[in-house]
Image (tube, rainbow, N blue to C red):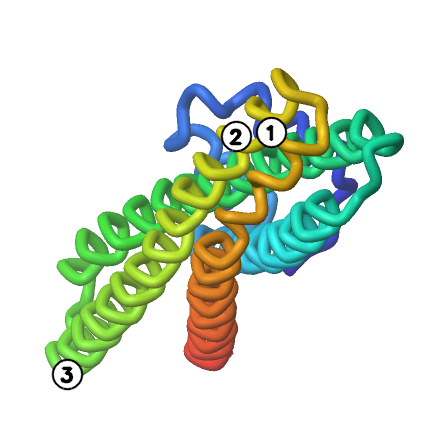
Amino acid sequence: MPSFPSFLLLGLSLVLGGCAGTYYKTMEKLGVPKREILVDRVEEARGAQQAAKEQFASALHEFLAVTKVPATDIQKAYDGLKDQLDDCESRATAVRDRIEAIESVAQALFVEWGEELAQYNNPNLRAQSARQLETTKRRYAELRRVMDQAAARMEPVLVTFRDNVLFLKHNLNAQAVASLDSTTRALQGDIGRLVADMEKAIKEADAFISAMKTAGQ
C-alpha cells in the first residue's frame, strides 16, 4: 500500500467523513483501493480489541486490589478504580467505532465488486470472481459476528464496574470496600469470557487479513 503521511489521511477522513463514497473515490485516486482500506481497518480493529482486552484485565486486577486496601488508602483506591473505569469506557468506544468503520468500507467494497462482475466478457473469469466475492462475504460475516460478540461482552462488565465505582464513591469506608468482594467471582467470570471472545475475534481478524492479502497478490 502506498505510504502517505498520517496527517494527510487523517485530514481526508475528517473532511470527507460525511460522504464515504467521496472519501473512497479520493483514496482510490491516491492509489488506495477499498480492499486495502478494509484490510487496514480490520488491522486497526484488531489492535483496538487487543488494547481493550488488556485494559479490562488491568481493571480487574485493580478491582481485586481495592478489596484488600487499608481504610487509610480507600480514597486513593477509588481514584485508581475510577481511572480504570474511564479507560475501559474509552477502549470499548474505540472497539465499537473500529467495527463500524469496517462495516462501512466492507459494504462499499461488496457493492462495487458485485456491480463490476457485469464488466467481464469472459464468463469463466466472471464466475471465478463471483465465487471469490461470495467467499469474501462469508468470511467477513463470520469476522463481524465474532467481533460483535466480543464487543457485546464489554457492556455487562462495564455495568458492574460503573455500579461498584459509584457505590464506592458514595461510601468511602471499609465496610463498602468489603462489600465489593461479593461481586469479585462474577466479575472474574465475565471478564474471563470477555477475554476469550476478544482472543477469538483477534484470531479471526488475523485469518481474514491473511486471506485478503493472499487473494490480493
> Residue 117 appears at what percent x and percent y?
18, 62
For disc 1, the marked residue is: 165
Mark 2 or mark 3, whichever is nearer to me = 2
Looking at the rendered structure, the kind of residue marked 2 is Arg
Q: Give the vertical position of 88 relative to 16 (above or below).
A: below
> Residue 157 appears at what percent x and percent y?
46, 45
Q: Earlier in the sequence, mark 1 or mark 3?
A: 3
Instruction: State the CA–CA distance, disc 2 to disc 3.
Output: 57 Å
Q: Give the vertical position of 166 relative to 114 (above or below).
A: above
120 displayed left or right of 197: left
> Residue 149 appears at what percent x and percent y?
33, 56
Q: Residue furthest top?
A: 170
Q: Give the vertical position of 164 relative to 134 (above or below).
A: above
Instruction: State the CA–CA distance, disc 2 to disc 1.
Output: 5 Å
Mark 1 or mark 3, whichever is nearer to me = 1
Q: Disc 2 vs disc 1: Cβ atoms closer than 8 Å?
A: yes
Looking at the rendered structure, the kind of residue marked 1 is Val
Query: Residue drawn at (60%, 51%), measured in percent from left and top?
Result: 56
Q: For numbered disc 3, what is the local secondary structure?
A: helix
Q: Disc 2 vs disc 3: Cβ atoms closer than 8 Å?
A: no
Number of other residues with Cα within 10 Å of mark 3, as a class: few under 14, some 14 to 19, many 20 or more: few
Residue 116 circle label: none
Q: For numbered disc 1, what is the local secondary structure?
A: helix
Decide if residue 209 is in sight here: no
Query: Residue drawn at (43%, 46%), measured in percent from left and top?
Result: 99
Query: Residue drawn at (51%, 45%), measured in percent from left and top?
Result: 95
Query: Residue drawn at (49%, 53%), measured in percent from left and top?
Result: 187
For disc 3, the marked residue is: 124
For disc 2, the marked residue is: 162
179 displayed left or right of 172: left
